[in-house]
Image (tube, helix red, strand yellow):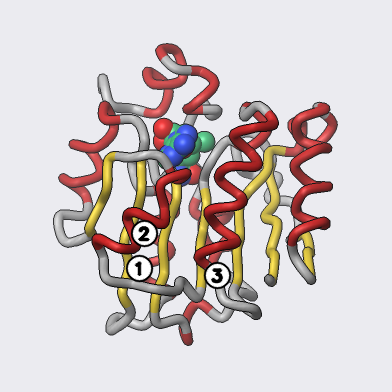
Amino acid sequence: MKDSILVQFLRKPLTTGAICPSSRELSRTLTECIHIEEARNIAELGPGTGAITAAILSAMNPQAHFFAVELNEAVIPAFRRRFPHVRLYNDSAANLAKIMELESVSRLDVILSGLPWASFPDHLQEEILHAVLEALPDGGYFTTFAYLQGTWLPTGIKFRRRLEKYFSHVEKSRIVWGNIPPAFAYRCRK
Ligand SMILES: C[S@@+](CC[C@H](N)C(=O)[O-])C[C@H]1O[C@@H](n2cnc3c(N)ncnc32)[C@H](O)[C@@H]1O
């Protein structure tokens, strides 16, 4: 219970950014239209207790290389209990380059994020997006969800503008109304 997303939201609202884990439908939506089944190197940023991780593991090629990066140490035990074979780093997504070195990976074909971008200040949005762009080859995919209500916040609007500035192609998925709160995925191609 102490490592649930709700308790973590009450303790760290800005870094957790959610009151409950993503629904199955939102998690599955995140893995669609990004050619994840062809990807050789995949990373997840901000997995929390692993709602999206489960969808990634069932969509990816089992031979692919996969790791995750989670900042909040309080949710790490729950993630490890659920996915004992997934390599998880207790670190910030901003340090992706360093973690890729530890993983002996020079490029990531697909990066999936559950990060709460609309809670992040400008400098953190820039820092993490820069790390993502450095990690992807041209043609690589980045996907992340956004809560509907967050897209009208100034930080949510700035985030969308950044995606449009940095990626060659950005599209939105359908809205998953059954998620709490309703959300959609941004699918971005470098
Ligand atoms: C909205 S929750 C999403 C959890 C899970 N992916 C899901 O969809 O249910 C955001 C997660 O991102 C993590 N997080 C926030 N800032 C981070 C950062 N800089 N690097 C890595 N993880 C971060 C939080 O600790 C939290 O677990």
Q: Is mark 3 within 8 Å of ligand 1?
A: no
Place of residue 56 in the rendered image (x, y in percent of width and height, measured from the top left):
42, 65
Tell me the residue at 60%/61% (across/down).
133
Q: Can residue 21 be seen here?
A: no
Disc 2 and disc 3: Cα gap in Å? 22 Å
Q: Residues within 10 Å of mark 3 (few under 14, many from 20)?
A: many
Q: Could you say whether the residue bearing mark 3 is in a helix, strand or loop?
A: loop
Q: Are marks 2 and 1 in contact (CB under 8 Å)?
A: yes
| Screen quadrant of the C terminus | bottom right
Residue 123 screen position, x and y as percent: 64, 32
Q: Earlier in the sequence, mark 3 or mark 1?
A: 1
Q: Nearer the viewer, residue 47 or 22?
A: 47
Crowd tier of the residue under label 1, counting other residues whose Cα lies within 10 Å: few below 14, some 14–19, many 20 or above:
some
Residue found at x 41% / y 53%: 96
Q: Amino acid at mark 2?
A: Ala
Tell me if residue 125 comes above or below residue 4 in the rendering: below
Q: Are marks 3 and 1 in contact (CB under 8 Å)?
A: no
What SS does tag 1 mark? helix
- Give the residue number, with chain letter if any, for mark 2: 54
Residue at which label 3 appears:
136
- Mark carried by residue 57: 1
Identify the secondary structure beneath mark 2: helix
Q: Is residue 105 left or right of residue 10?
A: left
